[in-house]
Amino acid sequence: MRPPLNTDGTLPPTLPMGTPDVAYHLALRGRPLPVVFAFRFGGPAPSLEAVRARVAERAHRIPALRYRVAPDRKVLLRVDRIAVEQHVHEAWLSEDDAGGAGAVRLLLSRPMNVGERPTWDVWLVHGPEGDHTLCYRTDHTLQDGVGAAHTARALLDDNPEGGPAAHHRSWPTPRGLAGAIGDVAASFRPTAKPAFDGTSSGRTTACHADTSLERLRAIGRAHGGTVNDVYLAALSHAVRTWHLKATGSPHPPLPVAVPMSVRAPGEECAPGNHMVVARLLLPCDETTPRQAFARVAARTTRLRASRQRDGLNLLLAATPRAIGARIGTRLVNGSVVAGPASSVNFGQALVHQGLAARRAVVLSGLASGIRVLTTLTGHHDVACLTVVHDESLATADELPDLWLAAVLELERA
């Protein structure tokens, strides 16, 4: 639900945490899990003072920035004063951090505030090539990726309109409810994931690949599917190729968690995680990207037609919060899925101080035994694949190029 206003138009002093929020809080044992939205620019950087002035002007009007998790209680506490100088920072990258990935690594590894301030910050990161990256970072207990997109737009954009589409809720079909229950049941069955099973090092890095968003749309149309189908089918084939090269063995179907937003109109900048998670098996056993696409598209079509997203949301609403949160910790856990495979379309380019960003990336840190996550971020006409992985997966930086190669195969098929 959207945050209710008091009779005087102010935000209430406390808000109950939703089931997904409590699930993150339990899984992380109260530690923050960073969600980062990073916008890369090619022109001269604004001053730190100018960024702080923009944040000071807008932060108090954005509900998601006004709350923190209460210690020892499952509620969010309103914070009445935001000290901008404690939330907006500056950093410089070394010559080894060219290409934009350094800013992401910095913000995934840098500790977040766990005091009495709201757990979010903004970073102005200067690159070694004269570029700069403007980053909004929050705690996943307090906000999901789509919420972070809307908040970053509202906080930083010269013209803060647009963003990911809202979800218009409806009743699921019986098949959608059955699918939701089936996903929950599957979360209690450990699954072999030979490419990603193993022990985490605790050190995280990220790598990227860019392509045209319109190119992905055209490929999706040609094969009777969507951009998301292209993304997941190419990812499936990339994992197959990567694992085959390393081991000489094919990879079985790979379970991933696909986050789906349930933010309704008016909830764009509401605090909390307004999302559910569906389980999807990437067909890494298929020999061609086209065969993988057919299976992925068939599965996502069933998800949409049955309105399983609404079925999962209804199931969460009908389950006591403590039980639902425990189930939630199972749905995204390294024993049952390789990791999240998410996508966010930010929409038109973010413009800050008159300069348009060239690329945007949204991602989060790793937890609960997860050693890899992937995101596809759409920003204007650029689609950026990001692979966040534990450094124990030493060759995972090959996956973005293998993904691009699979996209090319789909394009030519």
Image (cartoon, rainbow, N blue to C red):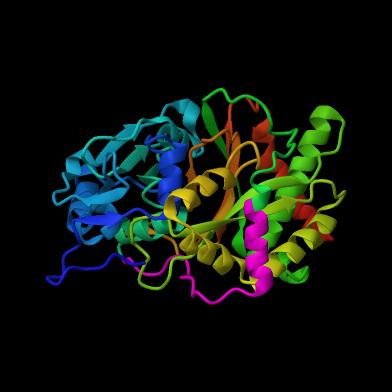
Front residue (pair 32, 36): 32
Count of numbered marks: 0
The quarter of the picture where residue 293 lies is bottom right
Which of 338 and 53 lies nearest the eye of the viewer? 338
The quadrant the C terminus occupies is bottom right
Q: Is residue 301 left or right of residue 98?
A: right
Residue drawn where x is 72% and y is 71% of the image:
221
Residue 289 in percent (x, y) is at 81, 53
Residue at 85 percent of width and 52 percent of height: 288
Residue 392 lies in quadrant: top right
Picture residue at 49% right of the left edge, 58% below the top:
319
182 in the magenta segment: yes
Residue 384 to residue 337: above or below = below
Measured as percent of width and height from the top left, residue 117 is found at 22, 41
- Residue 353 is at least partly visible in this image: no
Q: Is residue 140 left or right of residue 86?
A: right
Q: Nearer the viewer, residue 35 or 97?
A: 35
Point 43% across, 40% down: residue: 26
Magenta segment: does it hold 71?
no
Whether residue 96 is visible = yes
Image coordinates of residue 178 in percent, x first then y, are 67, 65
Q: Is residue 368 above or below residue 375?
A: above
| Horizontal and vertical percent position of residue 185 | 66, 51
Quadrant occupied by the N terminus: bottom left
- Which is nearer the eye, 159 or 108? 108
Highlighted range, magenta: 159-184
